[in-house]
Every structure is written in structure tokens, then in C-alpha cells.
Image (cartoon, helix red, strand yellow):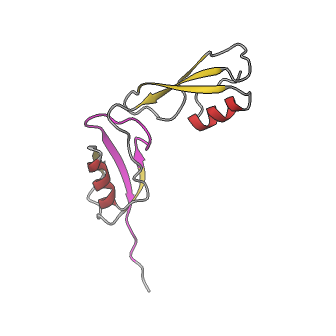
Amino acid sequence: MPLVVGDTVARAKERLALQPLTSQLVYQPARPRQRLGVVLRQYPSKGTLSSYQKVTLVLPRALHGEVPKVVGLRLARAEARLERYHLKWKVGGHPNPAAKVIWQSPHWSTAATHGLIVRLAVRTQAARHG
């Protein structure tokens, strides 16, 4: 039986199906900033199973939502999206709202919590000289 702990859900299901085994998903509350969609545990974790027997996969579930992806967005739009998710943000200096977000922490698809601050790095557009 393959060990699928640490794999994404899609990859884990694919690997189990090749055995062929079936999968059942169960969830546990995610810790703040924990990556979502990744297998935390599996039952049974070792041994042999007959074809089409069930493997239970434990996944984290965000209780207070997840951090959205804002990389690639203009700063004003990124701030609006984070506001909709009730998250705070922090950007160094006083960048132009048209600046583009090039980095964020915590990463998207991680569990959020009340009052979580998402740090952003932006790149301002350089003026073009003709």
C-alpha cells in the first residue's frame, strides 16, 4: 500500500486508484497558516489490503476560511480581495495602488484565522521613455 501522507488529495487518490484501492476523506480542523488540500494521515498507514478496500485520508479543513491568491493583482484589487476575506494586509512604504503584487505570505490555499495579516511585496511600473 502506498504511503500518501504529504501528497495533494488528487495525487493521493490517483496513487491509491492504481493499486486499486478506494479512498474516503475525513477532515480535522486546520491550524492557522496550515497548507490545505494535503493529506495529513492515512488509515491504515501500512500493511496490505485487498483490491478495492478503503483507505481513509485525513485532510485539514479551514475553520475561518483560507488565504486567497493575490499575487499578480494590482495592489488596490488585492487589498479589496483580502478585505472581502476579512484579512488584514501589510505593505512596506507607500506604494502606488496600481503597483502589482509579486509576493505574499502566507501562501494562498492556507488556513486563515481572525486578524491574520498577509504581507505583500509589490513592483511599481517603471516609467517608459520613448
Q: Main secondary structure of the magenta part?
A: loop
Q: Residue at x 73, y 14 (%)?
A: 48
Give x and y (percent) for residue 25.
Answer: 53, 27
Residue 5 in sight: no
Q: Which residue is depicted at the point 64% across and 27% down? A: 22
Q: Is residue 116 left or right of residue 123?
A: left
Quarter occupied by residue 2: top right
Residue lying furthest top in this view?
47
The answer to whether 37 is drawn above or below residue 125 in the figure is above
Report if residue 110 lies within the magenta region: yes
Q: Is residue 38 magenta?
A: no
Identify whether 76 is placed above or below 53. below
Q: Is residue 36 above or below residue 87?
A: above
Q: Visible in this render: residue 77? A: yes
Residue at 62% in and 21% down:
55
Q: Quadrant of residue 95?
A: bottom left
Write the start and end of the magenta stretch as one range. 104-127
Q: Farthest residue to the front: give it.
A: 52
Which of the pair 26/12 is nearer the observer? 26
Front one among 51 and 65: 51
Q: Is residue 114 left or right of residue 107?
A: left
**Drawn side of residue 19 relative to residue 26, left or right:** right
Q: Is residue 119 above or below residue 63?
A: below
Looking at the picture, how far across and down is residue 129, in whole percent? Answer: 42, 83
Q: Nearer the viewer, residue 70 or 62?
A: 62
